Image: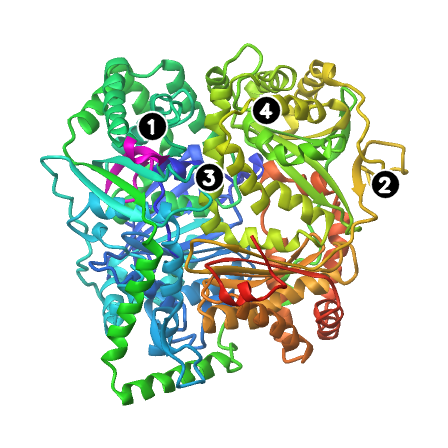
Amino acid sequence: MFRQSKTVLQKLRNLRFQWQNPSWRFRSTSATERALQYQEGQKIHGFTVKEVVTVPDLFLTAVKLTHDNTGAQYLHAARDDKNNLFSVQLRTTPMDNTGVPHILEHTVLCGSEKYPCRDPFFKMLNRSLSTFMNAFTASDFTMYPFSTQNGKDFQNLLSVYLDAVFFPCLRELDFWQEGWRLENENPTDPTSPLVFKGVVFNEMKGAFSDNERVYAQHLQNKLYPDHTYSVVSGGEPLAIPDLSWEQLKHFHATHYHPSNARFFTYGDLPLEQHLKQIQEEALSKFERTEPDTAVPNQPHWDRPREDHVTCSPDAMSPDAAKQNTLCMSYLLGDITDTFEGFTLSLLSSLMISGPNSPFYKTLIEPKIGTNFSSVVGYDGSTKEASFSIGLQGMAEEDTEKVKQIIVQTIDEIIANGFEEERIEALLHKIEIQMKHQSTSFGLSLASYIASCWNHDGDPVQLLKISDSVAQFRQALKDNPRFLQEKVLLYFKDNTHRLTLSMSPDEAYLEKQVKAEEEKLQKKVQALSESDKKDIYEKGLELLSVQSKIQDASCLPALKVSDIEPTIAVTPVEMGTAGGVPVQYCEQPTNGMVYFRAMCSLNTLPEDLKLYVPLFCSVITKMGCGGLDYRQQAQQMELKTGGMSISTSVNPDYSNMDMYEQGVLLSSSCLERNLPDMFHLWSDIFNSPHFDDEERLRVLVMMSAQELANGISYSGHMYAMTRAARSLTPTGELQETFGGMEQVKFMKRIAEMPDLTQILRTLPRIKRHILNPLNMRCAVNSTPQKMSDAAGQLDNFMSNVASNKKDRKPVRSDITERPLDPLAAPGSGPSRKLITEPNFKPCQMKTFFPMPFPINFVSECIRTVPFTHEDYASLNILSRMMTAKYLHREIREKGGAYGGGARVGGGLFTFYSYRDPNSVQTLSTFRKSVDWVRSGQFTQQDIDEAKLSVFSAVDSPVAPSNKGMGRFLSGITDELKQAHRERLFAVTDKSLVDVAGRYLGIGQRTCGVAILGPENDTIKKDPSWVVK
Ligand SMILES: [Zn+2]
């Protein structure tokens, strides 16, 4: 996987907690207290303790160590969280575009000394209960993290990771498969033409089909032109074939050494055990080296520079005549200065975030472009940070105007500074981010400290966020012009500034294809006949290795008996507020209250359906009550952790043709701000503003641009949604709300010269949605705060009672399911589901031509709902087919970035991601069914699929989200437990049986969709609908 850079503030946003029962913190055996007993200078398993620090804000104790022999650095964050994490990061600083660190990241995971079987990484996915396993290549480091809640599993995974990173096989065949190779198009036919293949080669072709990605890459390369940031660490597709196997091995020898490594562990498992295992299995086998990997500072320019690049035109863009991007990027200070980094990232938020920020007012609201440029704000992922500001979706002739506005805005900021209330709102946001708990806290922490630590900054200092907040407040107090002086220094007076523009070139794709062809011909022409024979034979060899049944018994594995037989129960209580049913769920939420409301769409006329996503995205951003949209945004930031509305379509758990349709309100706040949050919701319900066409246009443009940009990244989601469209009523509605149909609809709206008709439509939707008669609510909070929350909710409901108008459902076919499964039907509150008895599933094949060089392919089959006895078998089957067949055929042999099968919503869905093949992949899907039916799998394969399914089923749930599955889809703990027992009971016979009955050709209705480049096979085949 290739990681894109993130700004510090984006990382902060992910910095969240999983805080256990508060009373546990004070037990003498707590992980944080145990860690406090380490002493500076203490020697443990070859390491020396350097520092022990408590970080009360994050409820953790940090222990910093150094490995005596090699100098490897180590940070342990002890915290009472079961979801333990390990990560090792190496400083990888390539000096060319061959993507050597990225190809190495893939290749080390292909087999190692102790685990020589092919692909131990992917195999461990199915032999473990990991909650996360991955690897990332950033611009200047490579990171290998995993997390799990099981102690035995932690040791197993640690052993595999250490061996992979420090003792990989790096076989030539692995390099060909993962990196690049020349191979006959059809490997079994020596007369078929030679082509480039390889996983990273295709992955990067896919990555560079995304214009935002292209722009970000150029910007970094050109702003730091003198060292490692001037190259593409992921690999420039056409430079990848310049990498040799020897160079790859050399890069490993010089970069993947403990003296160049930083280890991080997190959670409640004891530190000694980790150190012992890391010492014994890896570090004891190395001596210290002096890695030459440090990144020097970029020499400062004495005058600003300008540059220009091109990209492919975007058919989905809201305005074809406005596809230019322009931004100015400034080199800032060293990220190892923690406080300076903190200040600059806050300053960046003040300058660009939300409708009250100066750049939003001067760049977004005049509608010169559709949105900020893809790179915007503070970026602390390089040794010296940068700040970028600009627009995408703008006309070429506006270039000078945009440059002028940027310069003027900076002058205005220096003159006027920022309102105190905005600074407070931002600091409130940081407080919320520190209190909100997520399930992947360890991982967020690892990526939060990675960049700074990579350049020898102090990771512990970075964790002390409230120290930085206090220092920031003091600095402002001492000098009211503190921020303005920073703007003067880093922006106005900074001569290291790059202005980079990008414009579409009609011939862009064609030129790329031609360049690849030339590169290929150059390579092919240099080959002798015997070289060609060699290539053919190597291709066959790779194919035979890929096809061989592999013995993975060298790898450690958990057993099915290690899985908990029963689920942990989540108690909820049902009540009412102002006549509306409420689900209360008491959780250790760390002083936060989470509020959700589901509002049914059953009374909404059909012709308004397409507008619902637009309604959801603007309703909290147009102003309400006495607040205009700026004041509203300010209040939300000051008083809440965010307020949003989204569409929600939930298939029934027992009937494929029944579903609930609605919109979901979500918000959170600190306990003290509960009245303010409900006050804001009341205003949104009672008096939303629908009168500002200019404001609406800004929001429409931004959201149309976001949708268009998302396709090249989430193409598989769009393909799957489209393939499901004609199979179930839920599938049809999901396509309307979030599929290609919605993307095209938003593009049409963005192109309308006059939006008054839309402004008239929005209140019509509001009348149907924000109506207490069609609602139910959920509150998650601490037990202490629950009754207060209930009282506030009651008030809120009586405030919005004026919306209570009895509207007739437009549909007569409504089924009520009681919210309390034990209540007699009709005796209590219920969910109102729609049935579509006349829905006829039908087969459809849809193709969307796209300006990408790769495809997203999906086939979807109508099967059975969640409570059906065959659902568990189909679920296990999808995992087994993915791990044992589809991964091999689609990724290893086919060269796609990914592919697999999944179940959900009564559908069995195949998909591929960034796939060089199109219709061939459809036949691979078919062959996977034959493979199951022929029974060529083992009990071990089934057990592995079960482990993989259960690691998803049992993945940790944050306190804010506990009980939400039940709230939304009515699936109770009892139903989950019954499903769990059916999963345990799945056998080889039931797998072969369901594969035959559901997935065999002609057994069930299926739908197909492909997004990809112009395709002659499809064009000639009349069974396809080409969009
Ligand atoms: Zn990758």
Task: Reply yes or no: does residue 1014 show up in magenta.
Answer: no
Mark 2 residue element: loop
Residue 1011 is labelled as none
Left or right of 131? Residue 312 is left
On screen, residue 79 above or below 528:
above
**In the image, what residue type sits under mark 4?**
Gln
Badge 3: few (under 14), some or many (20 or more) residues near its Cα, within 10 Å? some
- The magenta region covers 375-397
Mark 3 residue element: helix
Q: Nearer the viewer, mark 1 or mark 3?
A: 3
Q: Nearer the viewer, mark 2 or mark 3?
A: 3
Mark 4 residue element: helix
Left or right of 482? Residue 350 is right
Give the residue pinned by disc 2: 822
Quadrant of the image occupied by residue 104:
bottom left
Quadrant of the image occupied by residue 102:
bottom left
Residue 706 is labelled as 3
In front of the other: 50 or 481:
481
Mark 1 residue element: helix
What distance separates the C-alpha of mark 1 from that of mark 4?
A: 39 Å
Query: Where is residue 277 shown, x and y percent of the image?
Result: 40, 63
Residue at (63, 69) in percent of width and height: 943
Residue at (81, 21) in percent of width and height: 806
Q: Give the mark nearer the N terminus: 4 vs 3.
A: 3
**In the image, what residue type sits under mark 2?**
Leu
Q: Give the mark nearer the N terminus: 1 vs 4.
A: 1
Task: Reply yes or no: does residue 389 show up in magenta.
Answer: yes
**In the image, what residue type sits under mark 3?**
Glu
Query: Where is residue 517 shown, x and y percent of the image?
Result: 31, 68
| Secondary structure mostly taken by the magenta-highlighted segment of the chain | strand
Left or right of 7? Residue 863 is right
